Amino acid sequence: MTLALFDFDGTLTTHETMPVFVRRTVSTRRLLGGQLALAPLIVGYRLRLVSGLLVRKAIVRVGYRGVRASVLQAEGEAFARDYLPQALRPEAMERLEWHRESGHRVVVVSGGLDVYLAPWCRSLGLELVCSSLEQHDGVLTGRYLGHQCVLDEKVRRLRAACDLQAYETIYAYGDTPEDVPLLTLASHAYYAGQPWPAGRDLLHGDAPYAAIT
């Protein structure tokens, strides 16, 4: 049995899609206020002094606190239908399709939000492990539900969803340091489209994987 694990943003897509989703779904008033409130965090992030986890946590708090969950869900479905198809990386999707045609189990493991990733994955019949937003009585609290699905949390959630010991071969694909714990699970790992760690041979006899750069 073979398992294939794909990060989403930057791996299956040409760019980070969560910032696009935020800009499309957060009101202009909140965006303007958020730009001022979060400016120090953004600068710190660009200087590599602040983690992406902290920035995303702050963005979710400012952008979605008090928003009705059903409204964001509808926005997510529209985003999955109308925007995500044009953001996909063709060579990465070809690789994903090769796994599916080979009968491998394919799971998208992402720090992105389920409101848009879940409908996209459903449309392709893919399994999903990702981040979710907390809600109370149908209203978003401005917090993540549990931890963001990045770094070691990707591994923890994946282990809860899959019996990894049941798979003889595991592929994993990522593009940032937040994906490294996921890559360590794999017998055949790719970082930004290249074998990982650097120098690892491409799997003998497999369909070639074009570099994702």
Image: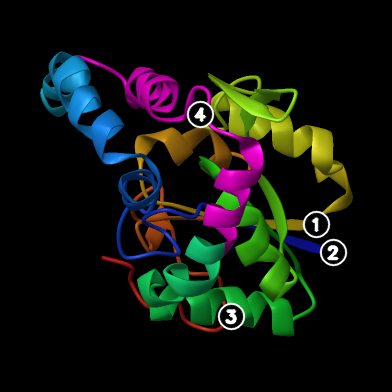
Point 67% across, 25% down: residue? 135
Disc 2 designates what residue? 1
Point 83% across, 44% down: residue? 162
* Mark 2 vs 1: CB contact within 8 A: yes
Disc 3 designates what residue? 206
- On the rendered image, what quadrant is the C terminus found in? bottom left
Label located before the other in sequence (2 or 3) = 2
Separation of residues labelled 4 and 3 (CA atoms): 28 Å
Point 37% across, 22% down: residue? 62
x and y percentages locating residue 172 in the rendered image: 57, 54
Separation of residues labelled 2 and 3 (CA atoms): 15 Å
Q: Is residue 23 above or below residue 192?
A: above
Point 54% across, 19% down: residue? 143
Q: Which residue range is magenta in the image?
A: 48-77
Say few, some or many: other residues with alpha carbon within 10 Å of mark 2 (under 14 / 14 to 19 / 20 or more).
Answer: few
Label located before the other in sequence (2 or 1) = 2
Disc 4 designates what residue? 151
Q: Is residue 76 above or below residue 184?
A: below
In this view, the mark in front (4 or 3): 4
Label located before the other in sequence (4 or 3) = 4
Label located before the other in sequence (4 or 1) = 4
Disc 1 designates what residue? 168
Say few, some or many: other residues with alpha carbon within 10 Å of mark 3 (under 14 / 14 to 19 / 20 or more).
Answer: few
Q: SS for tag 1?
A: loop
